[in-house]
Image: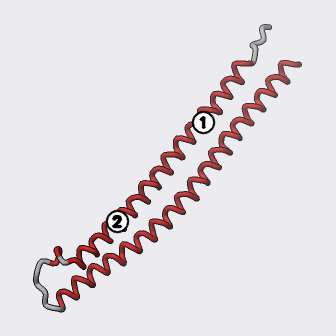
């Protein structure tokens, strides 16, 4: 009778480990979701700044065109300043994209770590059970 209770207890512990594994994985997924959404909001802001910078560059070039200036626009100080602003905002967008990728990779590694941890616990629980010889 003790063997049946021992097996039932072991089965209950294994089930508990499954629940804990998937619970922790769900928590990590939720954290990843929140962090990715926050980063996407940052990216949207950075893209808005980038669009304003493009607009500023276009306005500057158009004002030079309206003035009849046909010289090399790339070398104008105002155009150079607008180009610098565009480069900075583009790098901000790329940094946000990299951080989103890092968050996703971090989630995958934590998920694998949780799975490995609880798989080892379940395996150790299974190896503790002595086999009955009848």
Residue shown at 71%/35% (left/top)? 17
Q: Position of residue 65 (x, y in %)?
A: 17, 87
Quadrant in which the C terminus appears: top right
> Residue 56: percent from the left, percent from the top?
31, 81
Question: Which residue reaches farthest top?
Answer: 134
Q: Is residue 6 above or below residue 95?
A: above
Which residue in the structure is indicated by mark 2? 90
Disc 1 packing (10 Å; few <14; some 14–19; many ≥20): some
Indicate which label's residue lies in the foreground, 1 or 2.
2
The one of 10 and 91 positioned closer to us in this rendering = 91
Q: Residue 34, labelled with which disc?
A: none
Residue 109 location in percent, x, y?
Answer: 52, 41
Mark 1 — residue?
Answer: 115
Q: Give how far apart the Cα atoms at labels 1 and 2 are.
A: 38 Å
80 horizontally vs 108: left or right: left
Q: Left or right: 127 with respect to 107?
A: right
């Amino acid at each position: 009778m003790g063997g049946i209770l021992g097996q039932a207890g072991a089965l209950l512990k294994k089930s508990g480990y499954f629940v804990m594994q998937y619970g922790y994985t769900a928590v990590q997924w939720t954290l990843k979701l929140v962090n990715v959404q926050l980063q996407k909001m940052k990216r949207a802001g950075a893209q808005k700044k980038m669009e304003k910078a493009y607009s500023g560059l276009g306005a500057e070039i158009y004002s030079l065109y309206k003035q009849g200036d046909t010289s090399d626009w790339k070398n104008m100080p105002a155009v150079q300043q607008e180009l610098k602003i565009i480069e900075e905002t583009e790098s901000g967008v790329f940094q946000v994209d990299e951080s989103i990728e890092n968050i996703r990779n971090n989630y995958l590694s934590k998920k694998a770590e949780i799975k490995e941890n609880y798989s080892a616990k379940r395996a150790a629980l299974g190896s503790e059970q002595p086999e009955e010889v009848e």
